[in-house]
Amino acid sequence: MAEVLTHTKVACDHCGDPCLSDAIQEADKNFCCHGCQTVYHLLSDSGLENYYKIEEKTPGISMKRSISKKRYEHLDDESVLYRILDFYDGKTAKITFKTPQIHCSSCVYLLENIHKIEPAVIRSEVFFGKQEVAITYDPNKIKLSELAALLGKIGYDPDLSLGKLDKEEKDHSDRPLFIKIGIAGFAFGNIMLFSLPEYLAGPGGVDAQFIHLFGMLNIALALPVFLYSASDFYRTAWTGIRQKVWNMDIAISLGIMAMFFRSLYEILSGYGVGYMDSFAMLVFFLLVGRLFQNKTYERLSFDRDYKSYFPLSVLKLEGEQDKSIPATNIEVDDVILIRNGELIPADSVLMESEAHIDYSFVTGESDPVKAQEGGLIYAGGRLYGASARFQVKKPVSKSYLTRLWNNEAFRKDSQESLRSISQRFSRYFSPAVISIATIAALYWLPTSPSNAINAFSAVLIIACPCALALSAPFTLGWATNILGKNKFYMKNSDITERIAGINSIVFDKTGTLTWSERADIRFRGDKLTEKEIELIRSAVHNSTHPLSRKVYNYLTQDEEAVHYAVSNFQENPGRGVECDVDGHRIVYGSAEWVGLQKTDQSDDRISASHVYVSVDGVPKGYFEVQSAYREGLSSLFESIKGKMNSYLLSGDNDKEQQRLLPLFNTEDNMRFQQSPADKLNFISQLKQRGENVMMLGDGLNDAGALRNSTVGVSISEDTGSFTPASDVIMEASTLPKLNTIIEFSKKSMTVIKISFAISVLYNIIGLAYAVTATLSPLICAIIMPISSITVILFTTLGTNIAAKRLGLEAWK
């Protein structure tokens, strides 16, 4: 039983607030209100006691403010659900809540384990920087209003302002930083003004009364700077201490405190006039440096979000014709045509009688969902079966699709990287700097306490791990954007480092080395009737396979071509397609798939691919497809010769082996009639031999190999057939630049290493002067942000100059 203790002044074991009135005591725990007690029981009963162990300080949020369940009832209205849900199929729903209360690692732990409190929650993922949590749940077991109430009950009341759902909310995240800079700048200017009499006084000095007055005014102006403007440094430092992780703000905070309290002591004791002007200027420069870093990060992030995902195209219907346009250009109410295996880029309404949608990209569940006409289909779904028309109901969300691409299910095993090495180095930096500062202070203390404090402050201020920590992210960020301008789109910036280590490249043939659209085609077999041509044309139009697209273009001679509805569409990767078209059974693909033995070739077109076809079980013959190879292949393979191994994996026969031999040098490096499983096994064998493998494929038949490679590159050519297993989407026109891209990635790694050296040299020189007590804290405050700015400018110029010298398009 809980016991109420009157007028006890203890801290709540959940939120840490003082129990100023009646404290609720239970066993050895104290709670400031029944809300905190309830949450404590909820977490304990769910096996989440570790929530209170991650942070030394009580991590909970005060529950004194009661949350009414009625507050969330409007979320169950269908019109509201449609506007705020990321995904819904009747069995699974997904929503992203803005939760401003997220502030520490305990919050992340609790929210990502909320399924232990509510079994209807399938999974949850916290995006700490954006203070968001994405929750996937079973809507048949819990209503959205109940889920929101649960979050409110444990202290994470979601921000559900519906006005924000209709338009992008303007980002005001830097507003507090601007205010802090303004206060620090105002204080610095006025403190300098009050300090001028002391600086300009002659031999007689300034009257003691004025010195005391100006000193007290300086303290009054410096207090807001110390308590508010510098608060971010204290908060980050305290978080690091609680989590037992040394960060650079620990040293900065100690330097700020040392200068402020030293000045406070001198002014109040009458020993001197202090350094409040230097203190205010120090904080001002530190904040300006941080603002510069933030703005540079935002610029990189903006460019990344805008360009990262999309060379994706979609077929927009205009009357009876379809036109390929970038997915980012589609608008609300546009009608789009999605083919088998293509991604649905925006929330849309199905216009066909039925369709099967694969939401594994969104939910991880591989079983297709049957959708009916008029049903809402969510972005990220993949059409399975015959082509279907959709009417767009929401604009394309680039950030949402980018998040899907980076879904944990498609992430590869992490490896040691320069970024992680620099971050680990920065963690050891602060304790080392504090040790140096302490030793310097102890050295000077016996002879000059003033020099001891000066050396201690100078070391803490001038030592800057920022430059080390910024080298990798800024270089890789710029590399990502430069490669994006060259139509080489990476899912995240760390892939640049993996590309730099590539020593083997594996190429698919069809759709990778060959054009998806261009080909010389003829039909061999029984003469096709006009009706049969229309049936076959309708069937191949539903597939995004390069051979299907070539046959479709061959059969579509005029814009008035007839297209029939297709049903029971099934595509077997590496084999072929079968479907029903206007009451007829159409099967096309390999000879074995159609039920025939391959026909021996005796003419001079031995390098052609064959697409066999049957109508209603009767073999009609085959399309002989002479593929057109992409321009620039000879120069590409010549540029990588001797630098890395090249291999060919093709699902076609070996008829083109002699034609490709000059590119791959030896027949041992070319393998034909490879199934998707064969390609996957070959990649695994190369990796077991210690090779870093880049796989280039069309993304349809090569998903397993792309996923298993060190770097998987999906070739895009006006198609939405894209696999999340790939690390990169490369527009086909960029293929001849592949070696240049690899060389640029290596140059980027060199830029990181040089910037490391610059930052290390800066710290060695700065610390050498700081320990001598000859550098004033003000000079240190000016020099410190300059080091970070130097690294940022160097990485920016270094990556862009490297790109221009290699012939890549760079930022102007």
Image (spheres, rainbow, N blue to C red):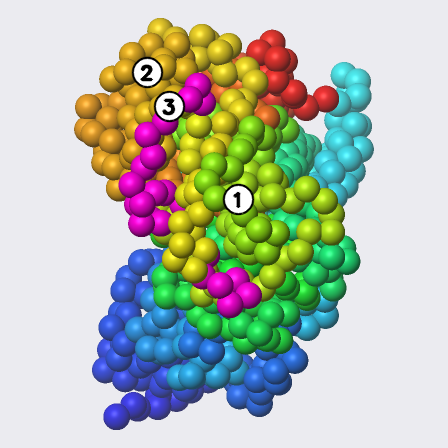
Q: Position of residue 413 (x, y in %)?
A: 30, 40
User: Which label sits on residue 645?
Assistant: 2
In-image side of 518 versus 176 (left or right) = left
Task: Confirm whether the magenta stretch covers residue 800.
Answer: no
The one nearer the camera, 418 or 480, is 480
Residue pictured at 44% horizontal, 47% vertical:
620
User: Which disc number belongs to residue 527?
Assistant: 1
Q: Residue at x 61, y 82 (%)?
A: 78
Q: Determine the CA span between mark 3 and mark 2.
A: 34 Å
- For this rendering, which residue is in front, 444 or 260? 260
Number of other residues with Cα within 10 Å of mark 2, as a class: few under 14, some 14 to 19, many 20 or more: some
Percent coordinates x, y for residue 777 in the rendering: 57, 25
Q: Position of residue 281 (x, y in %)?
A: 67, 32
- Point out the stretch of residues depicted in magenta: 581-605
Location of residue 185 by image quarter: top right
The local secondary structure at tag 2 comes to strand
Q: Read off the residue under disc 3.
A: 602
Query: 342 or 257: which is nearer to us?
Result: 342
Which residue type carries mark 2?
Answer: Asn
Quadrant where the image shows the C terminus: top right
Dot 3 or dot 2: first in sequence order is 3
Residue depicted at x 46% and y 40%: 525
The mark nearer the N terminus, 2 or 1, is 1
Amino acid type, mark 3: Ser
Element class at badge 3: loop
Of the image marks 3 and 1, the number of the one nearer the N terminus: 1
